[in-house]
Amino acid sequence: MLVLAAVPEIQVLRLRRAAGSRFRFVSTGRWGDVVDLICRQPIELAVVDPLLSGDPRSQEIERLRLLFPSLPVLLYTTFTPALAPVLLALGRQGVQEVVFCRFDDHPDGLRAALEREQARACSQQLLDQIATAFNPLRAEIRWVLEAALRAPEGVQTVEQLAASAGVGRRTCERWFLRAAMPSPRHFLAAARVLYAHRLLQDPGFTVEDVARRLGYSQVRTLQQHARLYLGLTAGEMRLSLTPDAALQLVVRRFLTLPHSAETGTS
């Protein structure tokens, strides 16, 4: 999982030490960089410090919540009396998880906080719902799908999907065949459309942002996939469907789709 760390450098180092290989970080010391980073990279969790600019402030984090309400936010900061009203204001915005420097940022505690927020990430919630909809979803397929959702820019083809699971293409295709599911090419394309739909619920993302974040070489391809699986353009599906309704449309299509059918994914 890629995590935005808008915190001082010493806290970035502590985060990296605590996270191990499970989380990757992109860091910035400027609030002005935050929105651009979220729009351009597959960031699924933000760790932020209300003291990043020196004085305790809530405005930038409140703006983050307004533009990207699906993005989990973890506060990692140093407690001072002046910070208390800022924490209250952010609590009213739904930011509940706080880690304080030198009090509860032992590596184990910091890693546990990251993992709790990971469970709220858009990709994790989508993966859990797909697994339920296609119950039982074989463990192997869950692994490859998780890899595709976690790093969509690096998993664009069935070959890359298989490589992310450490197997060959034919083995990957056999997993899907044994599970009586459509081809992995179809599954990958549909999962990306569902992920795009969820991202587009956030007002901070444009269709172009989402296409770039999910690794589409052209916005047109995202539009084609949106029409194929949901019968809507990317702009229309932003306004016309809830996430649950979008998932059910895809599930119904998969249940009537020949397992040998194929569609492009780039």
Image (cartoon, helix red, strand yellow):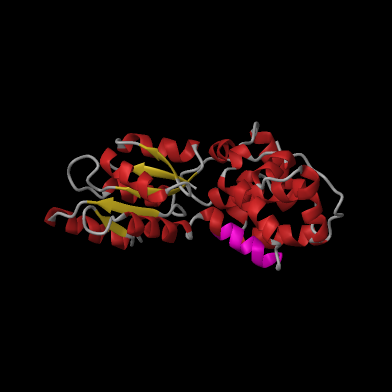
Percent x, y of residue 194: 64, 52
Q: In front here: 63 or 98? A: 98
Whole-percent x and y of residue 138?
71, 62
Residue 86, quarter of the rendered image: bottom left
Point out residue 266 in the picture as x, y percentages from the top left corner: 70, 35
* Viewer-proximal residue among 106 and 144: 106
Asked whether, in this view, residue 139 is left or right of residue 22, the answer is right
The picture places residue 224, in percent across and down from the top left corner, at 72, 41
Question: Residue at point 44% right, 58% down?
Answer: 115
Q: Is residue 133 magenta?
A: yes
Principal secondary structure, stretch drawn in magenta? helix
Asked whether residue 8 appears in the rendered view, the answer is no
Q: Is residue 245 magenta?
A: no
156 shown above or below 251 = above
Residue in the picture at 74% in, 42% down:
158
Residue appearing at x 63%, y 45% in the figure: 234
The residue lying furthest to the left in this view is 81
- Hey, which quadrant is residue 125 in on the image? bottom right
Q: Is residue 39 visible?
A: yes
Left/right placement of residue 208 relative to residue 112 reads right
Horizontal arrangement in the rendering, residue 111 relative to residue 83 (left or right): right
Which stretch appears magenta? 125-134
Quarter occupied by residue 116: bottom left
